[in-house]
Image: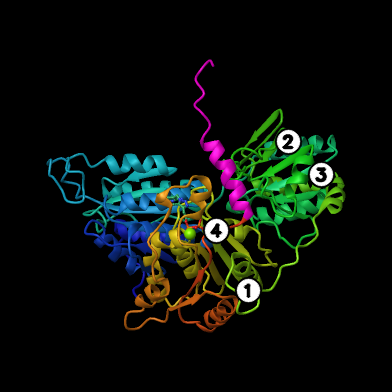
Amino acid sequence: MSSLPTKYTVGDYLAERLAQIGIRHHFVVPGDYNLVLLDKLQANPNLTEVGCANELNCSLAAEGYARANGVSACVVTFSVGALSAFNGTGSAYAENLPLILISGSPNTNDASQFHLLHHTLGTTDYSYQLEMAKKITCCAVAVARAHEAPRLIDRAIRHALLARKPCYIEIPTNLSGAECVRPGPISAVTDPVTSDKAALEAAANCASEYLSGKLKPVILVGPKLRRAGDGAEQALIKLAEAMGCAVAVQPAAKGMFPEDHKQFVGIFWGTVSTDAADSIVHWADALLCVGTAFTDYSTVGWTAMPDIPLMAAEMDHVTFPGAHFSRVRLGEFLSHLATTVKFNNSTMIEYNRLKPDPVLVRTATPSDELTRKEISRQIQALLDSKTTLFVETGDSWFNGVQLKLPPGALFEIEMAWGHIGWSIPAAFGYALRHPDRKIIVMVGDGSFQVTAQEVSQMVRFNLPITIVLINNRGYTIEVEIHDGSYNKIKNWNYALLVQAFNGEDGNAKGLTAKTAGELRDAIKAAEENTKGPTLIECSIDQDDCSRELITWGHFVAAANARPPRLPGV
Ligand code: TPU
Ligand code: MG
């Protein structure tokens, strides 16, 4: 193991900053513009380099690592690498994750000498990648001289950490090894911006006053609650208990409020809500939205947008009907409000009256043909306090959202960006940070085909991830939105493919299940395989999809098909 350098280069500086902000693994694909930089990162004893099969997967693995670790880094080469990694960077932007995208770039002499270079557009302007990165990050910098690197690197990382968004750092191939000064105290980069005391006080008072004038308050939790950090999730539990009201959760925030809490009233997803959460949300006369995100998907094609004025508590500000307060941190706001708010459990009393009875789930006999419901029933039995469940775009969203999370179980979904194939590299990145968690991925056949290669990294790092691949022979979610021959795909032998990734030394298992009994046996085999991933291909009927997906698909299709509204008409 090498030790920290006494003389710093740009590469050493970056490596030390990455390690200081808590990154232990950085995801890479090498290319000649970043090789010296990779050497420098490798030399840092606190960083482990993780090679990926391609840059799309690399960026999505870093996206998953950021979910587990709070921040991540992805290192790629110029253009051929970076343009692919922009996709996972876009995901990190939409999902509010600080992913640091680092790209090698041409030698600093080439632009001024009008040299044509490989991995470029064949013009002599090399600024295009930086310009593109500006649109999908909160801060994009290109180091042009070594002495500027400390300032630019610190600035980009600080912006990303504060905004919970990705940043971009471009380092020319001949500057990674160039000398620069040593890093100053890391607190200059990581120290949080705290709330403005006056604004915090005023916001909490305003909220208490507003809520005390209402009869039926409900809290709606959204995905930015966890992203806010600052103990916001714990603070929300305290606030909910102080208010005594019903707490509904958006699908992308599943698990961010404990599902075994007596005030949890289900997932609010319009007409496809669980446990009738929609009936109580639509009954409310005050809705405290905590880190919510209302999109066409989360509102079921705009059919479930609440129609009362919303109180929105965001990561760094709060907006109420008639008032706005900037620089109020979410965790601090929720904690403060918990001490001033009035108890009013009217929505809980009502909810307990209209709460649906638990549905009895039929257990299939071992010889029964496998169905979607039986797959869900068996996955439900697997969930425990150590589980993190990844659910992929497709019917897996709907099946996953309906499962009940026991205390401690976590749930990951990429609903804002919705990139099919996300779950495989993201679960891989996540697992490196949390090897102690039991990771289960629910993924459709179409999604799996996008990023299947990254299973080979799960094999390489001996990660016992269980992949439940639901093979319904095509893009069913798309069928429900708009059908066509393009929704049919080539079938693969998925179990065999995964075994191929073993090469001469891997421990991956690929299994198939066509009946309930075969799935039960396959799950048992997956639990016994502690040295590598297990993929279980579950074959189900093409028409076996959730009622929720069909309903949601119809409304989303209607929203997509709205005719253009011409100005003035
Ligand atoms: O359960 P099921 O059959 O719906 O899932 P599967 O088999 O994974 O199919 C997913 C189909 C799908 C597509 C093609 N869902 N969304 N899309 C559109 C899409 C295209 N390209 C990317 C990168 N992401 C997308 N969401
Ligand atoms: Mg499918």
The spot of residue 282 in percent (x, y) is 75, 40
Decide: few, some or many residues near mark 4? Use Cα within 10 Å; few <14, some 14-19, many ≥20: few
Q: Name the residue under label 1.
A: 382
Work out whether mark 4 precedes mark 2 in sequence or the reverse, and give the earlier one.
2
Q: Is residue 300 left or right of residue 486?
A: right
Residues 415 and 559: in front is: 559
- Indicate the quadrant containing the N terminus: top left, top right, bottom left or bottom right: bottom left
Q: Mark 2 points at which residue?
A: 202
Q: Mark 4 points at which residue?
A: 543
- Indicate the quadrant containing the C terminus: top left, top right, bottom left or bottom right: top right
One can see residue 22 in this view? no
Query: Disc 1 and disc 3: Cα gap in Å?
Result: 39 Å
Tag nearer the camera, 2 or 1? 1
Residues 95 and 188: in front is: 95
Residue type, label 4: Asp
Q: Is residue 155 left or right of residue 312?
A: left
The spot of residue 243 in percent (x, y) is 82, 48
Instruction: Say which residue appears at 37% left-offset and 68% top-offset.
Output: 50
